[in-house]
Amino acid sequence: MKKEMKKILVTGSVGQIGSELTMELRKKYGAENVIATGRKTKPTAELEASGPFYYIDVVKKDSVEEIIKKHDIDTIYHMSALLSAVGEKDPMLCWDVNMNGTINILNLAVQYEMARVIIPSSIAVWGPGTPAIAPQECALKPTTMYGVTKVAGEVLADYYVRKFGLDSRGLRYPGIISSETFPGGGTTDYAVAIYYEAVKNRHYTCFVREDTKLPMMYMPDCLKSTLDLAEADFSTLKHHNDFNVGSMSFTVRELADSIRKYIPEFTINYEPDFRQAIADSWPDAVDDSAARSEWGWTPAWDLDTMTRDMLEKLTEKHKKGLI
Ligand code: SER
């Protein structure tokens, strides 16, 4: 008998998405019912004070199993992963954490008859030659180790749906922009760093060219898409672990222009590095019609509303000396 979604484990809860997702889940399901975990990084005081937190290593199955047993976990949000840029610095570590971590979570979910598992994927599943607007169905030929692990993770999780009847779901997140926790080593990090630097120094040196265009999403939409998919009726889903999910797409030039509407003296220069090739290998935008029709996805934020909110939040933090 499958369990209900009552006791949730979040891996990677100290990360960019995990930290805000944990707080959102705690609001929704009760603080004691959401068990936050991380490998090494200390959680913020807010996260630590808000409910249970443990250090685990998703690569070490026993360390995850201990928490599952202790808290009778029935649902996992598996947010821990190495992103694209750090993954290129240490591809073997990226493989180890992203693949062995994921298969451990899937096997434990089957063993403990979990109600549901959420495993994020990414725009990194695509590679050079993908149409500018990536369709839901097309060849996945990534050129980063991160992308390789995300393609394999999607296919693996879909296998568990078919083979073991596991309810596993996942989204291909675009670059996620947020003001709480800085992302840990992705290619799309420039779209976050630009806001921090605009507030602190009125200037940003960008590591990709100004015409670089990628799909992006603001954190409130990221949380909404994650929870909407997690709560969708399984019987309405034709896809499971590979939903395209779109919100906005812009070039760095357009992003800088949007910031200048609020900070007219903001300046930017460009010093592309190895991350340019990664950005160039990803599509400009995604076709998310499957997410829209299968579970009703609609984004709420656009570039200018996001810019205003980001600048307000970061200016506040800067005044308090927090950034
Ligand atoms: N934000 C991620 C990265 O840049 C993409 O999923 O690696």
Image (spheres, grey):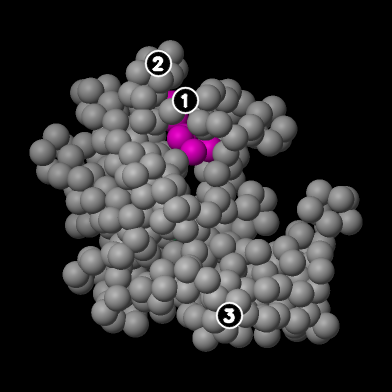
Does the magenta portion include 11?
yes
User: How many marks are shown on the rendered structure?
Assistant: 3
For the residues bearing labels 2 and 3, Cβ distance under 8 angstroms: no
Q: Which residue is mark 1?
A: 56
Q: Which residue lies at the image location 89% right of the left edge and 56% below the top edge? A: 319
- Hey, what amino acid is under mark 1? Ile
Q: Quadrant of the N terminus?
A: top left
- Hey, what amino acid is under mark 2? Glu
Other residues around mark 3 within 10 Å, as few (<14) / some (14–19) / many (≥20): many
Q: Which mark is residue 66?
A: 2
Q: CA distance from mark 3 to mark 1?
A: 37 Å
Q: Disc 3 or 1, which lies upstream in sequence?
A: 1
Q: Which residue lies at the image location 26% right of the left edge and 69% below the top edge? A: 136
Q: Which of these two is toward me, 240 or 278?
A: 278
Magenta stretch bounds: 7-13
Does any atom of ligand 1 lie closer than 8 Å to the CB of label 1?
no
In the structure shown, which secondary structural element does the residue marked by tag 2 occupy?
A: helix
Percent x, y of residue 79? 44, 43
Q: Which mark is residue 252?
A: 3
Does any atom of ligand 1 lie closer than 8 Å to the CB of label 2?
no
